[in-house]
Image: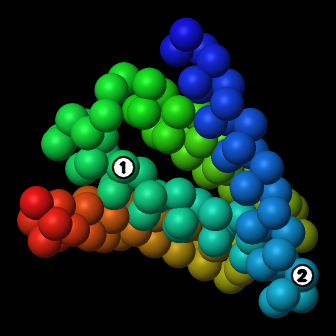
Amino acid sequence: MALVWIALGGALGAVSRYLVATAVFKWLDKPFPYGTLSVNLLGSFAIGVAYIWLVHHQWGGDHHKQLAMVGFLGAFTTFSTFSLESITLMQQERWLAACGYIGVSLAGCLLATVSGIWAGTWLSKSIG
């Protein structure tokens, strides 16, 4: 049954990644991978919140973790795409853009995860 929850979450996450990344790319209309950056930052924040609620506070059961964290967020974030886009920027000799993208992605996603953990903790104290 775990595979069903992961597959369902993965399908929803992949579709969501496509919709969000495409919308951001079209909205900004710049030759920079803002769409991928956006989903990675959002996904990093969301996994911080999910960790607090689903793992730390043990809300729900294992199927909630499988659906949300492994399936949805695993498919929603795009580290493989990030890697390819970073290499592409380097191959285009856009060194400043490549370094900026890599730096903002790594630092930003770490900060987003910490922020998600903080927000999940704050919310759980406020509600419960």
Residue 45 seen anywhere in this rendered image of the structure: yes
Sooner in the amino-acid sequence: mark 1 or mark 2 = 2
Quadrant that contains the C terminus: bottom left
Residue flagged by tag 2: what amino acid is it?
Lys
Q: Are marks 1 and 2 in contact (CB under 8 Å)?
A: no
Q: Quadrant of the N terminus?
A: top right
The residue that appears at 62% across and 36% down in the rendered structure is 9
Distance of label 1 from label 2 (alpha carbons): 29 Å
- Label 2 element class: helix
The residue under the point 33% across, 26% down is 61
Give the side of residue 55 with respect to residue 63, left or right: left
Who is closer to the viewer here, 123 or 116? 123
Neighbor class of circle 2 (other Cα within 10 Å; few <14, some 14-19, many 20+) is: few
- The quarter of the picture where residue 25 lies is bottom right
Residue 73 horizontal side relative to residue 75, left or right? left
The local secondary structure at tag 1 comes to helix
The outermost residue toward the top is 1
Residue 113 in the image, given as x and y percentages of width and height: 36, 60
Label 1 crowd (10 A; few <14 / some 14-19 / many >=20): many
Q: Percent x, y for residue 7?
A: 67, 25
Quadrant for residue 35, please give it: bottom right
The percent coordinates of residue 73 (x first, y second) are: 55, 45
Q: Nearer the viewer, residue 68 or 96?
A: 68
Q: Could you tell me which residue is drawn at 85 percent across and 69 percent down?
A: 22
Label 2 sits on residue: 26
Name the disc covering residue 50, or none: 1
Q: Nearer the viewer, residue 93 or 67?
A: 67
Report the side of 27 relative to 13 (left or right): right
Residue at point 13% right, 71% down?
126
Which residue is the extreme one toward the front?
Answer: 128
Amino acid type, residue under disc 1 in the picture: Ala
